[in-house]
Amino acid sequence: MNTIKLLLSFALVSTLFTSCYTEVVVDDFAEPRLSVNQLLSSYELWYVDINATQGFGETPFLQKAFTISFRNGVVYANNNIVGLGDSGNGFGIDVGEYDAYDMILDVFHDIDGFETFDVFQVDNNTIELYNPNNDTSYFLDGYQRSNFDYDFVFYDNIHYFLQEYEAWEKTFTSNFGALNEFDNENYLQFLAGGNDSEFRSSQDDFGINPNNLIWDYTGIYGVGNVSGDMYLKTLTLDYDFFDNEYFELSVINDGKIELYHPDSETVYEFKGRGYIQYLKTENTKGKSTDSKQDKKRKFKKDRVENPRENTRVK
């Protein structure tokens, strides 16, 4: 009888321990989430994919930048095609300061002032910067300088490269080729703004300051691709009151271009005069007179006094 009771006691205790035991199995461990500062600094260059922009607003410093970089509180940008890859060791120029916290990015741009963004990681090398003030998102693709194709960006944006000089002065005309009306054109100018496709030409003598040129003709210009050759473009000058002039456009260097005129088989070379650096931080019209330290203090003060939550619901 005692033996039976003892066996029953062991069975009861075993049942109680079994009923209280819960097995916990962890199959996967979630990878730790990157902080916004780690995310922004994970790539040296962020290419602004302007064609992917969503919304009807505009954030000026992103709209004009080809690349943006975030390095130790300083924002760098490549705003110009001229010097792309060389300026600032590939980072471009210092255009402002930033602070990042709780997936929020605050930027104080030297020219355009304060902007704030919600930051979302789209995939391994793409982020979205959502500006709640204008309800617009910009999408940035991350690259290291060593694997960023500066040449592609340069040749894919020749249209803007032509606008980065106040004028292009003719420096060479080949001895071969038939005489034609364009022989008389000594200067070209490609205008930014407006419809972004206007040009002017002048027959003034060589060596004149671009500010003193008299522009004889105006029109619309277009740059096209040549199938199978990334380094060769077409340039069409559509004069307001004359026929079009068509050229094959080659870039010799950051300040010189070659135009081949198929109709006459003449080759011309033009040199850029009066380089325009966009959003430069010195001697810029409308630039605040505050020092960088003053701006930084104001920037920090505004963030402390006006904290906010991540405002966009994904």
Image (cartoon, rainbow, N blue to C red):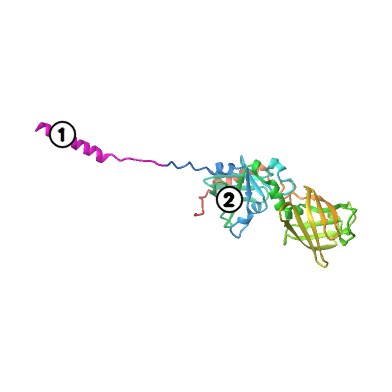
Q: Please name the residue shown 71% across and 56% down the image.
A: 227
Q: Is residue 32 left or right of residue 243?
A: left
**Tag count in the figure?**
2
Question: Dot 1, how many residues are within 10 Å of its Cα: few (below 14), some (14-19), or many (20+)?
Answer: few
Asked whether 287 or 131 is in front, the reply is: 131
Q: Can I make out residue 289 in this image?
A: no
- Percent from the top left, x then y, of residue 213? 86, 57
- Residue type of the residue flagged with mark 2: Thr
Magenta segment boundaries in residue numbering: 1-27
Task: Find numbered disc 1 in the image and state the secondary structure of the residue it sits on.
Answer: helix
Q: Please name the residue shown 18% across and 36% down the image.
A: 11
- Residue type of the residue flagged with mark 1: Leu
The image quadrant of residue 182 is bottom right
- The residue carrying mark 2 is 116
Task: Find numbered disc 2 in the image and state the secondary structure of the residue it sits on.
Answer: strand
- Percent from the top left, x then y, of residue 167? 81, 54
Assess whether mark 2 and mark 1 are in contact (beta carbons under 8 angstroms): no
- The residue carrying mark 1 is 7
Asked whether 296 or 134 is in front, the reply is: 134
Q: Nearer the viewer, mark 1 or mark 2?
A: 1
Secondary structure, magenta segment, majority class? helix
Compare marks 1 and 2 and give the one earlier in the sequence. 1
Q: Is residue 248 left or right of residue 56?
A: right
Q: Residue furthest left?
A: 1
Question: Dot 2, how many residues are within 10 Å of its Cα: few (below 14), some (14-19), or many (20+)?
Answer: some
Q: Measure how far apart labels 1 and 2 are at the Cα level.
A: 73 Å
Q: Is residue 115 left or right of residue 170?
A: left
Inspect the magenta stretch and tell me whether residue 99 lies in it. no
Inspect the magenta stretch and tell me whether residue 8 lies in it. yes
Asked whether 264 or 53 is in front, the reply is: 264
